[in-house]
Amino acid sequence: MHLTHARLALITAVVCVSPLAVVAQSFDVRAVAGMLQLRGSGVGLIEGRVADHLKDGRSVRADFELTVLEKPRGGAVAHGQYSFIVSYDLWEQRFAVTRAGTPPRSISHLTARNAEGWCLENMTVPLTSLGRFARDVPFWIRIDYRVEDRAPAANPDDDSAFGLRTLIDVLSRRRQDEMPGRSLEGGPFRVGK
Amino acid sequence: MARRLPRPFDMRTLTLLLLLASIAAPSSKASAQEPEPAEGTRIESAEVSGLALDQLSPGLQRDIEALKGDRFERGRINRLAQRIEEEHPDVVAAVRTVPRPDEEVRVIFLVARISDDGDLASNINLRYAVESVEVEGIAYTEISQVLRDRMQRLVGGKLEADEADDLIARLEAERPGYDVSRRIERGSRPGRIRVVFEFSESERLRWIPFARSRSRYVYHSDQGWSGVHDIPMGGRDHRVTLGFAFSNTDDLIEEYSGVRVRFESRRVGTERFGLGLEVSRFNNTWREPTQLALAANAAIPEPYRTRLTVEPRATVAFTRHLRATGGISFSNLVSLSHSPDSQMANAVVGGLAYTQRWDLDSRSHQNVDAGYEIRSSGLDSDLTYRRHFGHASYRYDNDHNTVIASVLLGRVTGQAPLFERFSLGDTSTLRGWNKFDIAPAGGNHVFHQSLEYRFYNVGLFVDTGSVWDTGTDKRLRASTGVGILGDNFFATLAFPLNAGGANATFMMGVRF
């Protein structure tokens, strides 16, 4: 009995302190050239600690995972992963974003909102991967992202690039350079509407 | 039109090279080679390289073409470069000036795609010339001349991310105990940046360390699973730790589950003074051997159903290695058999702690960790006791070899509550023995020593120790074992050496 209560307490606490907080829907979808493309802004990427970090002339990497769901919190229909590097031009006072991948794409002179919107627009899913959901069947979308400092490894002489200590640090400790992540879920959407 | 244009890739690469060379041009060093034209110099021609002119808006094309024959004005030229970038946000535009005869100047807008340059793609500020390199957190003179020279070589050029990152690594290697990060600020003139290497004391150099995490999930084949999870939150000076215990039997003779909250501030006016407060509430259960042992010995205080403890503490650091702690501890123990009757176990707490690390070279170091704590009942405590506990450990790491030696000693006089009594035979002490076989109700004396050798996280150990009550047999027990022995993960098979049988004990778990 103690264990059950304790587990409940742990789950409650972890949920409460987790940086993964669900925020309100702030995006839409459209079909462009056979791809499902997101539109919107205000995913909460460039604010708080991340914004402070960027305005110190540093850059961050944001790793997004987009999942198309058949219903709210339902099974995944399709998903994709996308990485972006964001920096803040100290003289132009605008943000620059590069989408990692082949080929990379970059853009600059963006406001924070527009930079977030550009990230969304560059997360696309082929309509062919949606199956029946590409034919006017409603679906939901979940976006998870994590932000990481682009700082280099602390000690290049350390040849233990990966170890259990690293793994446990990553899983269990709040590192100094740890940045927030978030989850957003929205819907229902229909292709073509 | 008759001339054959270079292939797009060649053109792009050429433009990029020119651009990057040009980006460095505004710096003091570069400008010594290519002086900034004087304001008012007549412009012989203005052109755009790396982007077809017709890709610009008609207005911008006109304004660039209008430069020809006009007087050179840096602000006007820079604004045109900025307009090129605003119309094509996937590029950067820099201005290069080429002196011409008759005191004229040729203006070239060099345009290149951001994504064609890995550095720019990683941080748009790397397009700017470095005006100065500075250090924060330590005195500049504390850095070796070699690294100071390397840092100063950054001045005048575009900031190269790889070089700056390598410098950070070298600075950290030269100044162990500091974390180094890089910050970029605007320079004194447009298009220039200041690079600041920030040194911040790592945990090792803090005067008062935060309390160690007690997080662990461990399995002992005789005792089952135990879990403790600490979730620290906060910054460098102040921290709140939320902790949970799940059927934990790994450190006391009681099995407890519950929650604790610990507030720590290790900079109260000065880094040498810290304050802390821990509040915990645990539900307690008792294994059958413990209940039987307690029933057979009326001198030991009774078991309790719940334990609520409040412990405020203050810490003073004499040096970065030696510190003293003082505080009080209030515990309310609700009787197991006569609930809601309860007892108070209150004590004044004092202690000394010493930690030291010596880095012999980049791959070998030694650590010493020692401490002594005394708890003396008072403050209207229902239980009267005094508890002394001391421990010391030495660790030597050399490449992938590790030797750890540790010893602990403890003594309780009077009637100490059960959570203050000593036990051995868990996943850390007398590994291979079961605490509920050795001393199920604990003891008021303890002695333990351990020697462990690890190679690539595979190791072996020998533990010896004894836990006993005054007037009883002080039997010295020993055990040995082998297995995976990492700092955070272990899986070992251990054997008691001087027991009647040869029962093996399997233990595994994570501590973090």
Image (cartoon, rainbow, N blue to C red):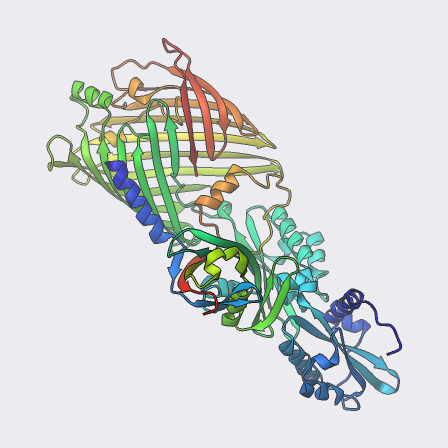
Quarter of the figure that contains the C terminus of chain A: bottom left
**Residue placed at 64% from the left, 61% from the top?**
A104
- Of residues B45 and B424, the one nearer the viewer is B45
B350 up-or-down from B251: above or below: below
- Of residues A32 and B350, the one nearer the viewer is A32
Q: Quadrant of residue B9?
A: bottom right
**Residue placed at 48% from the left, 34% from the top?**
B487
Quarter of the figure that contains the N terminus of chain A: top left
Q: Is residue B349 among what the camera can see?
A: yes
From the top left corner, tell me how far across and down residue B25 is, in percent. Answer: 75, 72
Q: Is residue B131 among what the camera can see?
A: no
B60 up-or-down from B263: above or below: below
**Residue placed at 19% from the left, 20% from the top?**
B292
From the top left corner, tell me how far across and down residue B501 is, in percent. Answer: 37, 9
Q: Is residue A36 left or right of residue B300?
A: right
- Of residues B48 and A120, the one nearer the viewer is A120
Q: Quadrant of residue A5?
A: top left
From the top left corner, tell me how far across and down residue B84 is, in percent. Answer: 67, 79
B49 up-or-down from B451: above or below: below
**Residue placed at 31% from the left, 38% from the top?**
B245
Looking at the image, how many numbered discs can be counted on the residues?
Answer: 0
From the top left corner, tell me how far across and down residue B149 is, in percent. Answer: 72, 57
Q: Quadrant of residue B54?
A: bottom right
- Of residues B182 and A80, the one nearer the viewer is A80
